[in-house]
Amino acid sequence: MTKKMPLNRPRVSQCVAAVVMTVTSFCAFAATDLEQNLSAVEAFSARTEPLIEEAQENGDAYSLLVEEVGDVMARTQSAKAAMQTVDLSKLAALARSNAALGDKYVSEYKAFIGALASDSACNRPESVVEFNQNIQKLRDTATTLSTLAPPSTEEQALETLMMLSANSVLVATVPSMFAVNNLCMLEDAAPVLEQFGEVEADIVKALVGQAILAGDDGDDLFPEAFEEDDFDQDGAN
């Protein structure tokens, strides 16, 4: 059995911010608000990265435990026998831990949107409601796991196994998937990008897309052809 590797999602915001900041540094008219927003994004990413990494570790641990139970069922052809091998208290603890990490993330997120310019595309206070709903679902899941009675029939055991598997998604996404909305920075940069030619703007968008796919490895995001002189020449035309 191969354990899933962490996706290191929190670094994506830092990569996208680095791309946009590098591009706008070539433009003498880069907006102060944009610089303020990018600084807020970078600071927010740095503060929440440890939360996301711990949550990913919890999610991987939960998924691994569920996979092990599935292996027992495949080997024994008995859901009831498989359920006898699972430590529900450990699964509940992992779910409860991610719910707590979600609370911390939301607290940081509220501080983050308070540091943004009011017209920033990243200023989305309505996301807090969605975050809190998912956190509460996860907390309810932890409570259910803590009070779950041992199944007495194969049918009950199978239903429980299906529930444990379905909960893997929720455990893995709170708060890990809260950090994936990064394109708002490109929306903030739109007024600056309009000052570039169509080709350069397409390059910027491609680099942002590459940053999102690259995740935590931003070393190769800036090709040599992407030089300040190119923008100086374009601006002179």
Image (cartoon, rainbow, N blue to C red):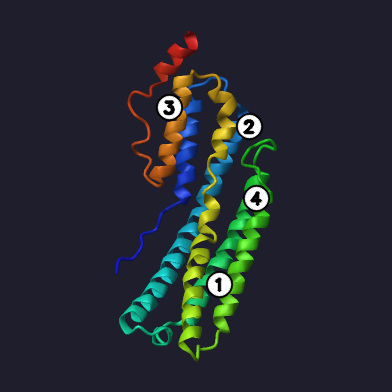
- Residue type beneath disc 1: Arg
Q: Earlier in the sequence, mark 1 or mark 3?
A: 1
Element type at mark 1: helix
10 Å neighbourhood of mark 1: few (<14), some, or many (≥20)?
A: many
Q: Assess whether mark 3 and mark 2 are in contact (beta carbons under 8 angstroms).
A: no
Q: Earlier in the sequence, mark 2 or mark 3?
A: 2
Q: Assess whether mark 4 and mark 3 are in contact (beta carbons under 8 angstroms).
A: no
Q: Assess whether mark 3 and mark 1 are in contact (beta carbons under 8 angstroms).
A: no
Mark identifier at residue 96: 1
Q: Earlier in the sequence, mark 1 or mark 2?
A: 2
- Residue 155 at x, y percent in the picture: 48, 84
- Residue type beneath disc 3: Ile
Element type at mark 3: helix
Compared to residue 156, the image places residue 121 above or below, namely above
Residue 93 visible to an observer of this rendering: yes
Element type at mark 4: helix
* Residue drawn at (57%, 39%) of the image: 184
- Residue 50 at x, y percent in the picture: 48, 57
Q: Disc 3 and disc 4: Cα gap in Å?
A: 32 Å
Q: Disc 4 and disc 1: Cα gap in Å?
A: 23 Å
Q: Is residue 186 left or right of residue 125?
A: left
- Residue type beneath disc 2: Asp
Q: Which residue is mark 2?
A: 33
Residue 35 visible to an observer of this rendering: no
Q: Which residue is mark 4?
A: 111
Q: Earlier in the sequence, mark 4 or mark 1?
A: 1
Q: Which residue is mark 3?
A: 203
Element type at mark 2: helix
10 Å neighbourhood of mark 2: few (<14), some, or many (≥20)?
A: some
- Residue 26 at x, y percent in the picture: 48, 22
